[in-house]
Amino acid sequence: MSAQDRIIVPLDVSTEAEAIALLDRLPQVSFWKVGLELFVGAGPTILQILKERDKRIFLDLKFHDIPNTVAGACRSAVRYGVDLLTIHAAAGRTALESAQSALAEAAGETNQSSPNLIAITLLTSLSSRDLAFDLKVPVELPEYVLNMALMAKESGLAGIVCSPQEASQIREVCGNGFLRVCPGVRPTWAATGDQRRSLTPKQAIEAGASYLVIGRPITSADEPAAAFERICAELGT
């Protein structure tokens, strides 16, 4: 894949009008993320707009509930024809397996492609200290993330969301075909913001990221298209 195809840009706005304005400013972006803010604020219409523009879609709703509920949510999500869909690994093995099975069943029943279900290992806003002192998890952060990734792989999921700092180990253990979608990616010329486990785009790709989720360095720039092209150029394409 080219650098352009590996960069996922979040539509982190709250209205359909704002989302369309961003799409218009960044026509060269082929892969967009729709998260909680936009999906709750504007509803699923934005997904149809993206499909009409022949864009790939990462529907990042981070399902985290009992197995029956996440399975139902996944069945409903199939109708949108998205490429990636997220669930929290912390929902547990039964929930992951139920969600994956529900996607496959719904896709077969409707003759549609199933989204690639990927698990959130640990939010990139959380640090080792947060894991130990606030969440009271008595293992080191890299071990925790790897355990979540292995459980996702064993449950039949297509990949995980992890920080780029963990991508290399997960690729080594889970294989190159297991997707590693990495937020927490910041060019050297952009502010880190609330990302606590970050690398530059080039470092992230070298570490084993399959896809990079890069938001504010692009969408908050004075010239978003120029910022996107600059990141692509830094990646060597």
Image (tube, rainbow, N blue to C red):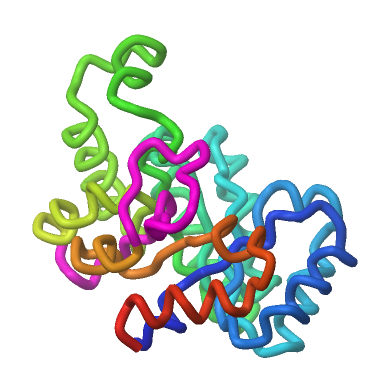
Q: Quadrant of residue 129?
A: top left
| Above or below: residue 236 compared with residue 135 | below
| Above or below: residue 31 compared with residue 160 | below
User: Which SS does the magenta portion mostly show?
Assistant: loop
Q: Who is closer to the viewer here, 29 or 55?
A: 29
Picture coordinates of residue 237, whole percent (x, y): 35, 88
Is residue 96 in the magenta section?
Answer: no
Q: Who is closer to the viewer here, 3 or 178?
A: 3
User: Which residue is most to the left?
Assistant: 172
| Above or below: residue 125 compared with residue 27 | above
Q: Residue at x 55, y 72 (%)?
A: 227
| Above or below: residue 233 compared with residue 68 | below
Picture coordinates of residue 20, whole percent (x, y): 82, 73
Is residue 177 in the magenta section?
Answer: yes
Taking the image as shown, residue 181 lies to the left or right of residue 86, namely: left
Picture coordinates of residue 225, whole percent (x, y): 62, 79
Range of the magenta residues? Answer: 175-200
Quadrant where the N terminus is found in the figure: bottom left
Taking the image as shown, residue 42 lies to the left or right of residue 231, namely: right
Taking the image as shown, residue 49 lies to the left or right of residue 166, namely: right
Count of labels in the image: 0
Taking the image as shown, residue 181 lies to the left or right of residue 108, namely: left
Picture coordinates of residue 148, whole percent (x, y): 28, 40
